[in-house]
């Protein structure tokens, strides 16, 4: 934050991904933060602890003994009506797993920053998307940031989405561990009063109130559990249009346009790659180079992972003959890695659909190099020419 | 409980009015039923103390009776009774 210059009512500052998330959380004026440190997320909660200690943020900061307790405290605080934030990574999220499902089913509005890190073993602290994928079914909204600017913007938007009375589901903002969490990048931040206008105080629904006792999360067996899950499933379907609305609303304040599916060059592309997170820039860089030589290649990346923007994705990939789905994780024994399965399901009943290839890349923080992306495009071009896929699973850059 | 609701009637799993857990008659879970022989009972109240529900009611005179609406048939009372005044019999038989 050393260099700050005034532009369009916003300040241009330099921050790491973790610092940008912490700054957004401060501006969001959260009431409760319960967290346990874990690399590469730690700086987020350290900065927030500084803000609270220095009196810049009036929040109760609950230092707990584990991630399981962190998220449990968040659930209680959110139900009590507070605006709540937590952050974690990898093994920390694994320890929260039990409470993840409860946080969603109880309709809390917790916002979590997830600095993506590979799951052990072997022990690794760098980026894979294992952690985000492992909670894909838990009923949380999930955003993926491509750069530090997006990590900041999406954190602010996540509060607005989660707390919307038509939503009431918790959100995760994913940012690639180290690649974004620890990278210093320039970004524009909104003024505090602008954030306050975009994000007014939370209006709790059915908050815990000693004057009006209620039972939260009671027992529901074969007679009611099924109906509660159907109700939750239907409620989750109403999330998507609200996200679109919040994206448009945020654009008015920031001038930055957000879409669930970002597309580059796909309108006329024969082949494309689909990717999540910070590597999208590398993929677009390669696509730009190939397109300048006349090759019809495109890139799609997802800002929104849950709810999965299936119909938007299908529409944007119309006419693409072969698609490489890039997964920064692996699903052992499954017919494809996690994102691949989502995409295959999204196209399941489409008469016109691309041939699908699954590329595994970047596990444990391995760099995705331009030549890896080029290799993916080449495989897709071969498949498109031959009309069939020879090798469905690629491991890009593995020795 | 009365009519079962559809998913359309439900939102978050919250019971908004307090004090209605009594409406859930857990006695329906019972496979074995405790049957008390008042003539053997020495009113020591151990069953009343140990019953986890609690489905043993203590009367004014310290005699006890079993509330079958909520007794789940765990058999703890029969096990604790020092004079074997409670017998566990198959539900629907005794
Ligand atoms: S069987 Fe169990 S629940 Fe029933 S009265 Fe005895 S101790 Fe209580
Ligand atoms: S434990 Fe046996 S003797 Fe004691 S009060 Fe209960 S039934 Fe009577």
Image: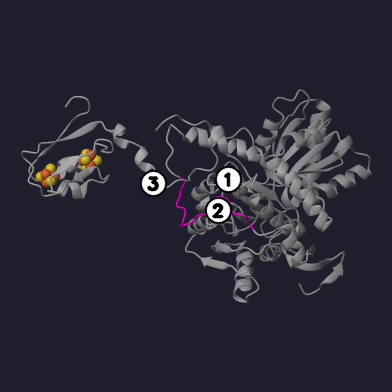
- Residue labelled with disc 2: A93
- Percent position of residue A122, x then y: 55, 53
Asked whether disc 2 touches disc 1, contact meaning CB atoms under 8 Å apart, the reply is yes
Quadrant where the N terminus of chain A is found in the figure: bottom right
Relative to A261, is B31 on the left or the right? left
Whichever of labels 2 and 1 marks the residue nearer the N terminus, that label is 2
Q: What secondary structure predominates along the stretch shown in magenta? A: loop
> Is A216 a magenta residue?
yes
Separation of residues labelled 2 and 1 (CA atoms): 9 Å
Mark 3 or 1: the one toward you: 3
Relative to A16, is A231 on the left or the right? left
- Residue, far front: B60
Quarter of the image where one finds residue A50: bottom right
- Residue, far bottom: A54
Disc 2 and disc 3 on one polypeptide chain: no
| Camera-nearest residue between A176 and A2 | A2
The reply to whether residue A128 is visible in this rendering is no
Label 3 neighbourhood size at 10 Å, few (<14), some (14-19), many (20+)? few
Label 1 neighbourhood size at 10 Å, few (<14), some (14-19), many (20+)? some
Disc 3 and disc 1 on one polypeptide chain: no
- Percent position of residue A94, x then y: 53, 51
Is disc 2 placed on a helix, strand or loop?
helix
> Is A378 a magenta residue?
no
Range of residues picked out in magenta: A202-217
- Percent position of residue A192, x then y: 74, 67
The reply to whether residue A27 is visible in this rendering is yes
Asked whether disc 2 touches disc 3, contact meaning CB atoms under 8 Å apart, the reply is no
Relative to A103, is B81 on the left or the right? left
- Residue labelled with disc 3: B19
Disc ID at residue A134: 1
- Percent position of residue B58, x then y: 18, 47
Label 2 neighbourhood size at 10 Å, few (<14), some (14-19), many (20+)? many
């Amino acid at each position: 934050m050393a260099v700050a210059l005034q532009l369009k009512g916003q300040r241009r500052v330099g921050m790491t991904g973790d610092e940008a998330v912490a700054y957004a959380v401060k501006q969001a004026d959260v009431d409760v933060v319960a967290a346990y440190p874990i690399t590469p997320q730690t700086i987020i909660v350290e900065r927030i602890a500084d803000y609270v200690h220095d009196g810049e943020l009036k929040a109760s900061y609950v230092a707990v003994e584990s991630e399981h307790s962190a998220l449990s405290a968040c659930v209680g605080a959110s139900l009590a009506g507070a605006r709540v934030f937590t952050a974690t990574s990898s093994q920390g999220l694994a320890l929260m797993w039990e409470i993840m499902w409860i946080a969603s089913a109880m309709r809390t509005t917790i916002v979590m920053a997830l600095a993506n890190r590979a799951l052990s073993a072997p022990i690794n602290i760098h980026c894979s998307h294992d952690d985000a994928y492992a909670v894909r079914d838990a009923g949380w909204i999930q955003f993926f940031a491509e750069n530090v600017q997006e990590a900041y913007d999406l954190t602010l938007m996540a509060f607005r989405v989660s707390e919307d009375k038509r939503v009431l589901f918790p959100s995760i903002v994913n940012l690639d561990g180290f690649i974004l969490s620890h990278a210093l990048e320039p970004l524009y931040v909104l003024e505090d009063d602008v954030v306050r206008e975009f994000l007014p105080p939370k209006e709790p629904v059915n908050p815990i109130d000693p004057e009006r006792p209620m039972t939260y999360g009671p027992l529901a067996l074969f007679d009611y559990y099924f109906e509660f899950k159907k109700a939750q499933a239907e409620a989750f379907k109403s999330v998507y249009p609200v996200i679109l609305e919040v994206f448009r609303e945020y654009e008015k304040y920031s001038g930055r346009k957000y879409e669930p599916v970002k597309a580059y060059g796909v309108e006329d592309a024969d082949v494309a790659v689909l990717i999540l997170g910070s590597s999208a820039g590398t993929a677009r860089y390669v696509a730009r180079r190939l397109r300048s030589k006349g090759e019809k290649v495109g890139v799609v990346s997802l800002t929104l992972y849950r709810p999965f923007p299936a119909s938007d994705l299908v529409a944007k990939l119309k006419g693409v003959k072969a698609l490489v789905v890039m997964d920064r994780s692996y699903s052992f024994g499954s017919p494809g890695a996690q994102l691949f399965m989502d995409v295959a399901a999204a196209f399941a009943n489409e008469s016109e659909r691309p041939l699908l290839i699954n590329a595994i890349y970047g596990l444990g923080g391995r760099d995705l190099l331009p030549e890896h992306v080029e290799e993916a495009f080449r495989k897709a071009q071969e498949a498109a020419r031959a009309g069939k896929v020879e090798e469905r699973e690629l491991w890009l850059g593995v020795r | 409980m009365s009519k079962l609701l559809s998913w359309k009637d439900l939102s978050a799993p919250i019971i908004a009015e307090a004090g209605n857990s009594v409406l859930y008659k857990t006695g329906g879970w019972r496979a074995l039923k405790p049957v008390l022989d008042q003539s053997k009972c020495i009113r020591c109240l151990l069953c009343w103390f140990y019953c986890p529900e609690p489905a043993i009611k203590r009367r004014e005179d310290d005699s006890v009776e079993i509330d079958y609406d909520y007794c789940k048939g765990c058999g703890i009372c029969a096990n604790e009774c020092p004079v074997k005044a409670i017998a566990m019999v198959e539900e629907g038989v005794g």
